[in-house]
Amino acid sequence: MFNTYQPWVIKTYGDLAKTKTITIKKYARILRTLRGEEANSAENSKFRFWVKSKGFHIGQPEGYDAKPADRIIGRHAVTN
């Protein structure tokens, strides 16, 4: 079953899939875009526009009360 299920998951939810899921790789690219680390070029202008149109930002929302679990870093955390 695993041999059938894994390729389907990768095809459906992987980095190249047409899905609304934000993968770890895409999350890292969003962060680079928000930090201004992505070079401005014609190739990534559509992605930069998409990030801006979604209203992504770095940081906590106003009025957010920090919780102890906020400091937990998972094994898939993007820290750069």
Image: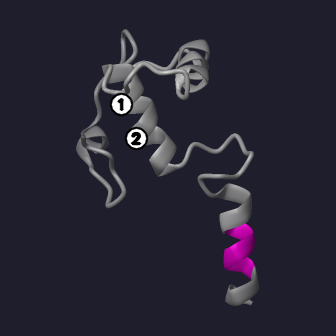
> What's the distance in space between the residues labelled 2 and 1, CA to CA?
6 Å
Identify the image quadrant of residue 34.
Answer: top left
Give, as a three-letter code, the residue at label 2.
Ala
At a point 53% along the width and 27% down the height, the residue shown is: 44
Residue 25, position as x, y percentages in the image: 46, 48
At a point 61% along the width and 22% down the height, the residue shown is: 46
Up the image or down, 46 lies above or below 18; here it is above
Residues in magenta?
Answer: 5-9
Residue 72 on the magenta segment: no
Residue 6 on the magenta segment: yes
Secondary structure character of the magenta stretch overall: helix
At a point 32% along the width and 61% down the height, the residue shown is: 75
Name the residue that disc number 1 marks: 32
Give, as a three-letter code, the residue at label 1.
Arg
- In this view, the residue in front, 63 or 78, is 78
Name the residue that disc number 2 marks: 28
